[in-house]
Image (spheres, coloured by chain):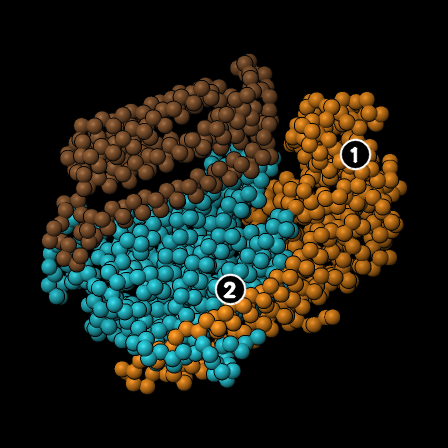
């Protein structure tokens, strides 16, 4: 119920307004819930990272000598489940989105604060089931849970992990629901749809995917679990069922889920580029609507995971052409980000470095998606390391870079402290180098024919695998560096001013860290997003000459 | 046209160079596109670097012409890639009717292969060079995927249905065979070798095979052992339909619908006889689920096929068999107009 | 509207500017949730449609062993409960506490009736071993004689039947819980003609659960009602 609408003293902020475990675990403040998410999500990132380390170490040698094959299978399965469902999907939306969306639209909180807290508890409950599954010996189905392996053959704790995924899905649904309602009904006076920061647009698109897709994975996992318990044959051909139906249902969610991971990162990058270049974003409406287009088209392309699954070749054609369609809005974003730099005032601070890194990775990740969407080529590449490299470029290169970039950009706002810039730039560089060294060799491995999920492999794949493992160790260090200095900055970092970047956006008009109610009084918005200078001064480049921007338009 | 692509497996089938060309084209596109953007970003980042702490950028209004340019040009390029990829896909996944057949059964964690001449092998596949090979595959347990990188060929093997795919080896040698779909504990152990041999060498290899007889002959033995012949009489007077000439023909079912009798239909009729009962017969046949292995089912299917091929010149020619194959891979039953037996050996070789 | 806290209504949560915004948020939230629910049921409907297309005869045979009369009664019960729910919303708008309480009580009573009838149906399936569980399922007459239809496909039908009606019944139970809260709030005079959005929003949920049943009933019960047996 409504608490007293106290008038806050200037120095009181959401962090020091109350102390004690209870004030955190029962909070309804979206900012505190974001911190709760931050802690748990980071924990799962390290759990998933440990499994990744095990996988890479095993692959140093062609023989399966470090781990038993069953153990190895559990490692990559748990790596996938933990990273996808417990890190990537909640990372940006539940941490940065939760913290920023109400502030960015000029509201005091999300529309349903209690549901917001409930979503965190649901997430934790799902996480506990998954941890239990790990402690009891793990799961060996792959994160994809393909039937009939998962329903009839796998010997791991499939049910526990399935329950974990099922439960945590509802956390995602509730977060998406909260965002949608907040964006619709809680915008401050004057905050029209086209004045919203692009971060909000991309989260709105993400939320659409969350509420429409997540229930399907919930029911799919439920069907899988029931099939495993009762064995009545919905995915079992011996009883008249169809194992490929599982794949259709699974990817109906799990492909759009990729957009749950990348769309928020795209929103972060739009903020970083515009604010670190101190310039209005080029083609605001194109960037905004491309998010919606990605969310909508994203639901129609799941079948591109089934090109070799004996689905009809004509269905394959439809899914292929739609996959190319979904690539276009992604390309539009990249072009607009690049064009935004034109005549900006570009800073090289850490958030911008992550943004540059993101664009680089996203170009490679996106372009290699075109390889896989090409039907005939996918026959050779499907289920090889090429696919592994491709989706890590998107999910780790894209989503995690966006997450880290955003984390640096808003760290002063969240904690009220500045991080050490020199270390941060160094860390960004290490991540960039380590990432490329880890995953680029995997493209080559894939084309050479190395299938994924192999515990042992023929000798001639070794050199590239060693490179990849070496890169992974660099990448691991790259992730530890920010972890260390960010924690360090909590105590020793210089106090952050309200707007350390000279950025625009409502979150920079409120103190760092913000008070519980976000704003002393509801702001009234009279300016456009990213308006660093009045638009009357704008230069129009629509009628550009051929030599004006050769590097963008003159491509191909 | 053969462009050497670094970090690619041997080019040992007719699909290989086509696949590699598309791959090389896409990397070229990636490099041009990526390099262009990186240069643009680098150029802007240097030219428009922040020179004083309070500097702000110069507002630039969007440009609809530019937006349309970088929407339409990628779209056209993407459609080109789509067409190229689709053409290749059709080439690989549309099995030509005249091809030498090989039966493949996946099982945790091995590939069991049987040739029409009767030879069996495990985790090895011997094929003659320059001959079209058609694989008819199924699995006894989970989903596997039959993958030969040097042939740029892969297809999932799904329980409960037959997956068919083809290839034509172009180069003698030994190549890797992988299972590409994760199938449990020893997934990475489900690998083997493909030996592409000169035709004469291949004939010699065949001659050294076991005396078990062809799959069709073994199927005939099973047909008697399982007492199928007590109902499916050759004179058509039995309690079950006469099977001579059935394979590849259009069968009318009890509910009036029609179906082409292909491999999947025969398989279903053995394992789940009541699913599609032929018009005029009672659903009295017991299921053989659990009594016969996938390999034996394949042999029975081969026998039923042989009844058509020796008996008549073609029955009804199925036209659109796509609709009956659950996976949609058209498996044109190659009963009709087999031009020469050398290309695709006859089933009943003595 | 920035100074709306001057006239704060007791039902206004701290983070909303005014009652209208809160009401709008609440009802949009429920609509969004219901879209999610449609997708949730959608997965099962998809499986049903696919396998019914494949095994239509066996599904019809299986369906003929459900009691369409009981299902029909339940359909009527739910339709009436939707009516009483709509009346409850009406009376909450009018501020008529007595009739509001009556209508909510009636709605809950009909909801409970539905569950009781459903319970009898489930019990009947339990007695005849028509619950597709390992070591329990048996598609035979009490004397051991095989029933018509492919046992595997029939089993699949019953499995979908239990999954779909089970999830639906679970929603019904949740609905009863929500209605209890609404009843309690109404008892304590929480609703006024200006503040009754909880009743409306819960009503949306209740209608949704009813509508799902309207789809389930023909798909599951009437599919094979033309077949006679016993």
Q: Which mark is residue A50?
A: none
Q: Based on the displayed image, in which of its 4 quarters is residue A239 positioned?
A: top right
Q: Nearer the viewer, residue B263 or B219?
A: B263
Count the labels in the image: 2
Q: Nearer the viewer, residue B150 or A520?
A: A520
Q: Nearer the viewer, residue A175 or A343?
A: A343
The cyan-tinted chain is A
Above or below, A196 relative to B122: below
Residue placed at 84% from the left, 40% from the top? Answer: B314
Q: Tell if the residue under mark 1 belongs to the same chain as the one under mark 2.
A: no
Q: Are marks 1 and 2 in contact (CB under 8 Å)?
A: no
Q: Few, some or many C-alpha atoms within 10 Å of disc 2 (few <14, some 14-19, many ≥20)?
A: many
Q: Which residue is mark 1?
A: B246
In the figure, what tint was chain B given? orange
Label 1 marks a residue whose chain is B
Query: Which quadrant, please, contains the C terminus of chain B?
Result: top right
| Secondary element at tag 2 | helix
Residue placed at 24% from the left, 55% from the top? Answer: A109
Q: Which residue is mark 2?
A: A328
Query: Which quadrant, please, contains the N terminus of chain B?
Result: bottom right
| Secondary element at tag 1 | loop
Tell me if residue A114 can be seen: no
Measured from the top left, where is residue A216 in percent x and y?
Answer: 45, 45
Q: Based on the displayed image, in which of its 4 quarters is residue A11 positioned?
A: bottom left
In the figure, what tint was chain C given? brown
Label 2 marks a residue whose chain is A
Measured from the top left, where is residue B76 in percent x and y?
Answer: 58, 67
């Amino acid at each position: 119920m409504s608490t007293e609408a106290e008038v806050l003293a200037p120095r009181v902020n959401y962090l020091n307004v109350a102390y004690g475990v209870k004030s955190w675990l029962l909070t309804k403040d979206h900012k505190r819930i974001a911190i709760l998410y931050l802690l748990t999500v980071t924990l799962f990132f390290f759990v998933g990272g440990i499994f990744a380390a095990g996988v890479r170490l095993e692959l140093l040698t062609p023989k399966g000598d470090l781990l038993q094959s069953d153990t190895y299978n559990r490692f990559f399965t748990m790596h996938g489940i933990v990273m996808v469902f417990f890190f990537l999907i909640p990372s940006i939306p539940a941490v940065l989105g939760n913290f920023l969306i109400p502030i960015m639209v000029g509201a005091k909180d999300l529309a349903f604060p209690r549901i917001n807290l409930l979503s965190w508890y649901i997430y934790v409950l799902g996480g506990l089931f998954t941890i239990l599954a790990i402690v009891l010996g793990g799961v060996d189905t792959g994160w994809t849970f393909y039937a009939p392996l998962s329903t009839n053959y796998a010997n791991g704790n499939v049910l526990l992990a399935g329950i974990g995924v099922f439960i945590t899905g509802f956390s995602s649904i509730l977060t998406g629901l909260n965002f949608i309602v907040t964006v619709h009904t809680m915008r401050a006076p004057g905050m029209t749809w086209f004045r919203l920061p692009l971060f909000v647009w991309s989260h709105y698109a993400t939320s659409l995917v969350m509420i429409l897709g997540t229930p399907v994975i919930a029911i799919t996992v439920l069907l899988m679990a029931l099939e495993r318990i009762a064995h009545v044959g919905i995915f079992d051909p011996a009883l008249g069922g169809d194992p490929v139906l599982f794949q259709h249902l699974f990817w109906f969610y799990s492909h759009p889920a990729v957009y749950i991971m990348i769309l928020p990162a795209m929103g972060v990058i739009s903020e970083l580029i515009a604010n670190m270049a101190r310039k209005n974003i080029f083609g605001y409406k194109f960037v905004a609507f491309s998010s919606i287009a990605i969310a909508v088209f994203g639901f129609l392309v799941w079948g591109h995971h089934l090109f070799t699954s004996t689905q009809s070749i004509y269905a394959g054609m439809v899914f292929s052409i739609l996959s190319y369609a979904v690539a276009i809005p992604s390309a539009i974003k990249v072009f607009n980000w690049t064009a935004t730099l034109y005549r900006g005032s570009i800073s090289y601070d850490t958030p911008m470095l992550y943004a540059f890194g993101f664009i680089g990775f996203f170009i490679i990740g996106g372009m290699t998606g075109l390889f896989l969407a090409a039907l005939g080529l996918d026959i050779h590449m499907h289920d090889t390391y090429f696919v592994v490299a491709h989706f890590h470029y998107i999910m780790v290169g894209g989503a995690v870079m966006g997450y880290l970039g955003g984390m640096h950009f808003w760290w002063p706002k969240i904690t009220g402290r500045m991080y050490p810039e020199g270390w941060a730039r160094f860390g960004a560089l290490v991540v960039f180098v380590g990432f490329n060294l880890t995953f680029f060799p995997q493209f080559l491995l894939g084309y050479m024919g190395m299938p994924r999920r192999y515990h042992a492999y023929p000798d001639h794949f070794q050199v590239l695998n060693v490179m990849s493992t070496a890169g992974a160790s660099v990448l691991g260090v790259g992730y530890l560096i920010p972890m260390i200095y960010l924690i360090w900055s909590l105590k020793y970092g210089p106090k952050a001013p309200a707007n350390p970047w000279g950025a625009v956006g409502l979150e920079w008009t409120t103190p760092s860290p913000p008070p519980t109610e976000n704003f002393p009084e509801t702001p009234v918005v009279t300016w456009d997003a990213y308006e660093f200078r009045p638009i009357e001064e704008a230069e129009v480049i629509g009628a550009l000459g051929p030599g004006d921007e050769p590097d963008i338009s003159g491509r191909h | 046209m053969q462009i050497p692509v670094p970090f690619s497996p041997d080019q040992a089938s007719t699909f290989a160079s086509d696949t590699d060309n598309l791959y090389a084209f896409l990397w070229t596109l990636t490099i041009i596109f990526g390099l262009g953007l990186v240069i643009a970003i680098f150029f802007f980042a240097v030219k428009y670097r922040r020179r004083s702490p309070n500097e702000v950028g110069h507002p630039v209004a969007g440009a609809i012409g530019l937006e349309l340019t970088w929407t339409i040009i990628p779209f056209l390029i993407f459609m080109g890639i789509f067409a190229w990829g689709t053409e290749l896909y059709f080439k690989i996944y549309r099995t030509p009717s005249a091809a030498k057949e090989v039966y493949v059964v996946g099982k945790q964690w091995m590939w069991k292969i049987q040739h029409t001449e009767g030879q069996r092998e495990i985790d090895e596949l011997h094929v003659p060079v320059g001959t079209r090979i058609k694989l008819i595959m199924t699995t006894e347990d989970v989903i596997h995927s039959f993958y030969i990188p040097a042939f740029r060929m892969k297809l999932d093997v799904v329980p409960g249905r037959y997956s068919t795919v083809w290839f034509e080896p172009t180069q003698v040698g030994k190549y890797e065979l992988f299972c590409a779909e994760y199938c449990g504990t020893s997934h990475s152990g489900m690998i083997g070798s493909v030996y592409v041999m000169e035709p004469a060498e291949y004939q010699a290899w065949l001659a050294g095979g076991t005396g078990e007889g062809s799959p069709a002959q073994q199927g005939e033995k099973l047909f008697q052992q399982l007492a199928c012949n007590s109902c499916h009489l050759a004179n058509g007077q039995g309690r079950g339909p006469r099977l001579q000439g059935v394979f590849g023909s259009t069968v009318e079912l009890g509910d009036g619908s029609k179906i082409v009798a292909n491999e999947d239909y025969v398989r279903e009729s053995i394992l789940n006889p009541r699913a599609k009962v032929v018009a005029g017969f009672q659903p009295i046949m017991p299921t053989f689920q659990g009594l016969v292995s996938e390999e034996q089912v394949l042999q029975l299917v081969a026998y039923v096929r042989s009844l058509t091929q020796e008996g008549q010149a073609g029955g009804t020619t199925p036209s659109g068999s796509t609709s009956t194959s659950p996976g949609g891979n058209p498996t044109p039953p190659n009963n009709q107009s087999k031009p020469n037996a050398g290309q695709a050996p006859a089933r009943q070789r003595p | 509207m920035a100074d709306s806290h001057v006239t704060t209504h007791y039902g206004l949560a701290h983070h909303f500017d005014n009652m209208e915004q809160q009401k709008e948020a609440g009802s949009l939230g429920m609509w969004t949730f219901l879209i999610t629910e449609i997708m949730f049921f959608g997965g099962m409907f998809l499986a049903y449609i696919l396998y019914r297309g494949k095994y239509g005869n066996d599904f019809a045979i299986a369906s003929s062993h459900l009691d369409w009369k009981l299902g029909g009664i339940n359909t009527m019960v739910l339709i009436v409960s939707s009516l009483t729910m709509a009346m409850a919303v009406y009376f909450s708008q009018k501020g008529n506490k007595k009739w509001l309480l009556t209508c909510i009580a009636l709605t809950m009573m009909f909801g409970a009736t539905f569950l009781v009838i459903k319970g009898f149906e489930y019990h009947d399936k339990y007695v005849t071993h028509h619950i597709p569980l390992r070591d329990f399922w048996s598609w035979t007459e009490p004397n051991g004689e095989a029933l018509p239809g492919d046992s595997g496909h029939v089993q699949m039908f019953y499995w979908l039947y239990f999954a779909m009606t089970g999830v639906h019944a679970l929603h019904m139970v949740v609905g009863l819980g929500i209605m209890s809260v609404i009843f309690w709030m109404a008892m304590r005079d929480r609703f006024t003609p200006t503040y009754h959005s909880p009743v409306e929003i819960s009503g949306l949920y209740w209608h949704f659960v009813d509508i799902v049943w309207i789809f389930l009933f023909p798909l599951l019960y009437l599919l094979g009602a033309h077949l006679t047996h016993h």
